[in-house]
């Protein structure tokens, strides 16, 4: 008598065995991380969606190389940041979509003028500073983890973060 | 104003527009649909090339065998001639 096939509980393992529903579950479980890194980098929803889709298509092709959930998280953050940097080098700088800037943050940053001002200042930062800020404040990562993802030494990450904050404080100090 | 708390609020995670996972899966499916005919065509091409190579190899082997037989026949004839001349 044939033994019934037992599928693993972990969606990652099931997806690696070719289960498309499990892959869909992986997407749903991680889409906000990937989409938000791209969104916070570009400030544009359509571009963020395009990048996020490409990241998950790439994940599908590389599923066999993912060793654990932690590795998956690291891989998604790293591939998304690399795609953002590559994309920013390839195309013209995006126009900031003010409507996009207001999605989801109205409840926590009540002053719309300040919200737009900060968003514009973030978009004016050099790409690497923007990326480091995003990983620091969106993903709540420390400089060590950011360095591993972006491929930068610890001190360079700290200095990049410091310069970004200094620049924002200086520019906001004039108006707030 | 605390810039760090402003940044945490502004750069928080947010969900993509609804149906995101479905759109990714649809792109995957579309890619597979495009890749399958190409893969079949490539496999057919490989078979044709390998088949051609096989035929070529057979012809080459046949010619080598013919040459070897000719050389052997010539050597045998030469040996026979030498035997005849010695026996005379």
Image (tube, coloured by chain):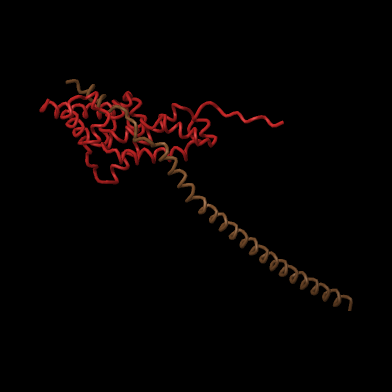
The N terminus of chain A sits in image quarter: top right
Residue for point 56% across, 58% down: B45
Residue for point 25% across, 24% down: B9
Q: Is A170 placed left or right of A155 in the picture?
A: left
Q: Quadrant of residue A49?
A: top left
Residue for point 49% across, 32% down: A22
Q: Is B81 placed left or right of B51 in the picture?
A: right
Task: Indicate the position of residue A19 as horizontal and vertical percent values.
Answer: 53, 35
Q: State the residue in front, B66 or A104.
A: A104
Task: Indicate the position of residue A40 as horizontal and vertical percent values.
Answer: 28, 33
Task: Indicate the position of residue A24 as horizontal and vertical percent values.
Answer: 46, 34
| Chain shown in brown | B
Q: State the residue in front, A113 or A168.
A: A113
Q: Quadrant of residue A114?
A: top left
Residue for point 14% across, 27% down: A172
Q: State the residue in front, B69 or B81.
A: B69
The C terminus of chain A sits in image quarter: top left
Residue at the far right in the pictured view: B87
| Chain shown in red | A
Residue at the far left in the pictured view: A174
Q: Is A41 placed left or right of A34 in the picture?
A: left
């Amino acid at each position: 008598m044939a033994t019934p096939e037992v599928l693993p509980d972990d969606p990652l393992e099931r997806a690696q065995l070719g289960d498309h529903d499990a892959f869909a579950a992986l997407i749903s479980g991680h889409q906000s991380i990937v989409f938000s890194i791209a969104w916070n980098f570009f400030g544009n929803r359509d571009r963020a969606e395009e990048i996020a889709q490409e990241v998950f298509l790439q994940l599908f092709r590389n599923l066999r190389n993912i060793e654990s959930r932690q590795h998956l998280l690291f891989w998604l953050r790293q591939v998304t940041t690399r795609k953002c940097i590559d994309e920013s080098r390839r195309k013209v700088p995006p126009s900031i979509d003010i409507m996009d800037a207001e999605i989801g943050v109205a409840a926590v940053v009540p002053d719309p003028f300040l919200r737009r001002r900060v968003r514009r200042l973030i978009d004016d930062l050099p790409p690497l500073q923007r990326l480091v800020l995003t990983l620091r404040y969106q993903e709540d990562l420390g400089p060590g983890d950011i360095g591993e993802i972006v491929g930068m030494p610890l001190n360079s990450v700290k200095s990049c973060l410091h310069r970004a904050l200094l620049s924002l404080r200086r520019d906001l100090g004039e108006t707030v | 104003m605390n810039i760090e708390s402003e940044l945490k609020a502004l750069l928080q995670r947010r969900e993509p527009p609804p149906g995101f996972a479905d759109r990714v899966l649809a792109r995957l499916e579309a890619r597979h649909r495009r890749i399958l005919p190409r893969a079949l065509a490539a496999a057919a091409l490989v078979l044709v090339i390998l088949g051609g190579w096989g035929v070529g190899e057979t012809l080459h082997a046949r010619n080598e065998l013919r040459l070897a037989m000719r050389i052997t026949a010539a050597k045998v004839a030469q040996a026979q001639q030498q035997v005849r001349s010695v026996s005379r």
